[in-house]
Image (cartoon, rainbow, N blue to C red):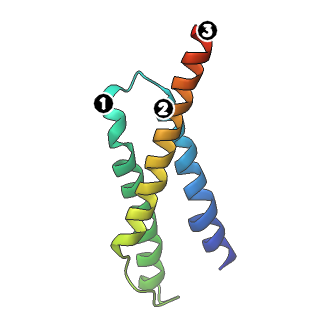
Amino acid sequence: MAYGILTHLVLLPLATLAASAVIGWRRAFGRRRWGTPVLLSALYGMHLLVTISLSNALGITNIAPLGFFVLLRMGMISLLGLLTGMGLHRLWDAARKK
C-alpha cells in the first residue's frame, strides 16, 4: 500500500512536473511541446491501468477501473510544469537582456 501511495501520488506526479518543466524550458521542441500534457497523462494512465489490471488478473485485489479524472489530474500537472518551464525561461531571457 505504501508503495502505491508513494509511487502514484508522489513520485510520478513530481517526475511529470519536472519533465514538463524541462520540456517547457527548451525551445527546440517548438509547437510539439504542447503535446506533452497529453502524452505524459496518457503514459501515467497506462502505468496505472497495467498496475491495476495485473493486480486484478492475479487475484490479489479487486480494484475498480480508472476514471477520466485520473488522466485529467496528470494532464493538469503536466500543463502546469510546461507553463512553469516556459515562464522561467522567459524570465531568464529578460534578465539576460538587461
Instruction: Tell which tag, 3 or 1, sits nearer the viewer.
Output: 3
Going from N to C along the chain, the mark reached first, 3 or 1, is 1
Disc 2 packing (10 Å; few <14; some 14–19; many ≥20): many
Q: Nearer the viewer, residue 27 or 61?
A: 27
Residue at 37% x, 81% y is 65
Residue at 40% x, 86% y is 64
Is 6 on the left-hand or right-hand side of 84? right
Establish if 82 lies above or below 39.
Answer: above
The residue where tag 3 is placed is: 98
Q: In which quadrant of the rendered image does the C terminus lie?
A: top right
Residues at marks 2 and 1 touching, judged by CB atoms closer than 8 Å: no
Spatial distance from mark 2 to mark 1, Cα to Cα?
Answer: 12 Å
Q: Which mark is residue 6?
A: none
Residue at 38% x, 76% y is 66
Q: Which mark is residue 86?
A: 2
Could you say where residue 3 lies in the image, as x and y percent from the top left? 66, 71
Looking at this rendering, what residue extends furthest in the front direction? 98
Q: Secondary structure at mark 2?
A: helix
Q: In which quadrant of the rendered image does the N terminus lie?
A: bottom right
Q: Which mark is residue 31?
A: 1
